[in-house]
Image (cartoon, rainbow, N blue to C red):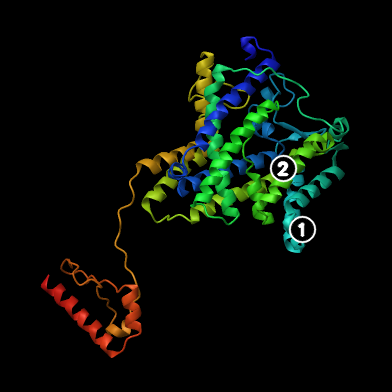
């Protein structure tokens, strides 16, 4: 937008207005009938979405653990074959850099031992709490482990340089509030399509997160209450995104880490959620608290978030466990959706531009395109490189077009061998045609549960009846 002559403040205001406009799409999804939502998002789609969200988030947590997202994605600059040309401090370009600066004055390459060690301290303390902590401590293990990692970072230093930036705490005012700066609301046409794609991604993520919340809260995911919660969460997500723009902030989405918190604390109370919202508002007003949170090193946050994100992944796997994976149809939908979704999550650069290298992905090079085409191209790139988006959409399409599995005959009941006198069974339905090729073993059925129960409780007369039935069956086979 700067190329079009807009100032930074004008460009930001136009993005806020565009976000408010596109949020209407998510409101539309929330107004769909419950039956339609359940049909579009059956259990197999929810399982795919939640699992892929977990895979993507766990990778993000690992980026933070190693030092930060930006330096993780610029790690290629430290490759031995190019470091002398584009590495840290070289004249070509060192911004963005493979050197992580998310820990106060310490600047080290991504994956440095110091960063890994600080993040690992969080995981170690989680194990200690599980081994020796009280029930209360286990329920509070997330915040306790994060505070422990923060403490370790606070008392540590790298060659005299601190990992915790206390200047952010000192610079923050005691009390602050919204609307400290205004931006003129506007609409930016080329950003509409990418923003609509972003809200589709948000819709899929919200449905997946709510499904995961139901799973870890031990609630059903196939009843009307679940559908109502899906509708309410989509409506709340859209309205809060509109309010966020009015509050001069970018749109929001559901917070997947909360599923991990619920799983570990065993607390799924709505009152806890309301209380959390209240305290978040308070912390938003008292800027000193925000200063403390922003001073936590990225590697410490990564050690905690990777643990929470992995809980989302486990929730997705649990949802898969509730599916009939012996069904060819369900298995095919799952495999095809997951292979694409996990693939682009692990390696999105097939469709996505590398950081600081816009419009260069060979999938669709567009450096000379018009602004409208660039917007369309970015939207398609985001869609194809977001694993839980493309994977979930594939699952929805496949679930719609693939026919149900053909019914297979089911052998029911238990056979009382003593009533028959040999290791054979007989058909409950005497009218079934028996077809057998010469040389094959005799095809035999079983009694149903009711007949089996009566056979178990019967006397000699039932044994004779069973033997007569066997004789009739064998006679039928011989006649064929």
- Image position, residue 244 (x, y; %): 67, 30
Q: Which residue is mark 2?
A: 277
Residue 473 falls in which quadrant of the image? Answer: bottom left
* Residue 18 in picture, x, y percent from top left: 59, 22
Front residue (pair 305, 79): 305
User: Total marks drawn?
Assistant: 2
Expressed as whole percent of the image width and height from the top left, the position of residue 374 reads 53, 18
The quarter of the image holding the N terminus is top right
Compared with 319, 182 (above or below) is above
Label 1 with label 2: CB-CB less than 8 Å: no
**294 shown above or below 448:** above
Q: Which residue is mark 1?
A: 137
Separation of marks 1 and 2 at Cα, in angstroms: 22 Å
Which of the two discs, 1 and 2, labels the residue nearer the N terminus? Answer: 1
Image x and y of residue 153, in percent: 82, 43
Q: Nearer the viewer, residue 446 or 58?
A: 446
What is the crowding at mark 1: few (fewer than 14 residues within 10 Å), some, or many (at least 20)?
Answer: some
In front: mark 1 or mark 2? 2
Left/right of residue 162 with respect to residue 479 in the rendered view: right
View extreme (bottom): residue: 460
Question: In the figure, 452 relative to 225: above or below?
Answer: below
Q: Secondary structure at mark 1?
A: helix
Residue drawn at the location 50% of the way across and 21% of the way down: 376
Q: Is residue 251 visible?
A: no
Q: Is residue 56 left or right of residue 129?
A: left
State the residue at coordinates (67%, 53%).
Answer: 269
Task: Pick the quarter of the image with the C terminus.
Answer: bottom left
In the image, is 407 to the left or to the right of 306?
left
Say which element carries label 2: helix
In the rendered view, tell whether residue 414 sits above or below residue 262: below
Mark 2 Cα shell of 10 Å, populated few (<14), some (14-19), many (≥20): few
């Amino acid at each position: 937008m700067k190329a079009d002559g807009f100032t930074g403040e004008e460009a930001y205001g136009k993005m806020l207005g565009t976000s408010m406009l596109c949020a209407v799409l998510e409101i539309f999804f929330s107004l769909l009938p419950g039956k339609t939502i359940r049909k579009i998002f059956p259990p197999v789609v929810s399982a795919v979405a939640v699992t892929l969200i977990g895979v993507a988030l766990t990778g993000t947590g690992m980026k933070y653990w190693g030092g930060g997202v930006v330096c993780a994605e610029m790690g290629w600059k430290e490759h031995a074959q190019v470091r002398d040309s584009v590495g840290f401090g070289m004249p070509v370009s060192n911004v963005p850099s493979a050197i992580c600066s998310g820990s106060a004055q310490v600047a080290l390459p991504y994956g440095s031992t110091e960063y890994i060690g600080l993040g690992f301290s969080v995981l170690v303390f989680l194990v200690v709490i599980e081994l020796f902590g009280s029930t209360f401590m286990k329920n509070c293990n997330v915040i306790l482990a994060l505070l422990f990692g923060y403490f370790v970072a606070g008392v540590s230093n790298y060659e005299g340089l601190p990992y915790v930036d206390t200047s952010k705490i000192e610079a923050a005012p005691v009390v602050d509030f919204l609307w400290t700066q205004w931006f003129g609301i506007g609409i930016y046409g080329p950003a509409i399509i990418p923003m609509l794609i972003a809200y589709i991604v948000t819709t899929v993520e919200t449905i997946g997160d709510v499904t995961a919340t139901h799973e870890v809260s031990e609630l059903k995911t196939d009843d009307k209450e679940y559908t109502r919660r899906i509708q309410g969460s989509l409506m709340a997500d859209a309205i809060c995104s509109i309010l966020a723009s009015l509050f001069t902030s970018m749109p929001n989405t559901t917070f997947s880490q909360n599923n991990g918190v619920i799983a570990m604390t065993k607390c799924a109370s709505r009152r806890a959620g309301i209380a959390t919202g209240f305290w978040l508002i308070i912390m938003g007003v008292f800027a000193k608290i925000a200063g403390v949170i922003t001073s936590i090193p990225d590697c410490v946050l990564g050690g905690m978030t990777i643990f929470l994100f992995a809980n989302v992944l486990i929730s997705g796997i649990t949802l898969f466990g509730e599916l009939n994976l012996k069904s060819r149809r369900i298995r095919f939908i799952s495999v095809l959706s997951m292979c694409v979704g996990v693939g682009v999550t692990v390696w999105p650069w097939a469709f996505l531009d590398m950081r600081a290298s816009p419009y260069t992905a060979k999938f669709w090079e567009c450096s000379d395109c018009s602004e409208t085409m660039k917007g369309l191209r970015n939207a398609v790139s985001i869609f194809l490189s977001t694993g839980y988006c493309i994977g979930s959409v594939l699952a929805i399409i496949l679930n719609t077009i693939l026919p149900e599995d053909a019914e297979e005959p089911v052998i029911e009941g238990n056979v009382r061998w003593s009533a028959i006198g040999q290791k054979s069974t007989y058909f409950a339905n005497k009218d079934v045609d028996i077809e057998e090729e010469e040389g094959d073993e005799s095809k035999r059925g079983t009694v149903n549960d009711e007949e089996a129960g009566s056979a178990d409780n019967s006397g000699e007369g039932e044994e004779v009846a069973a033997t007569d039935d066997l004789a009739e069956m064998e006679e039928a086979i011989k006649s064929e």
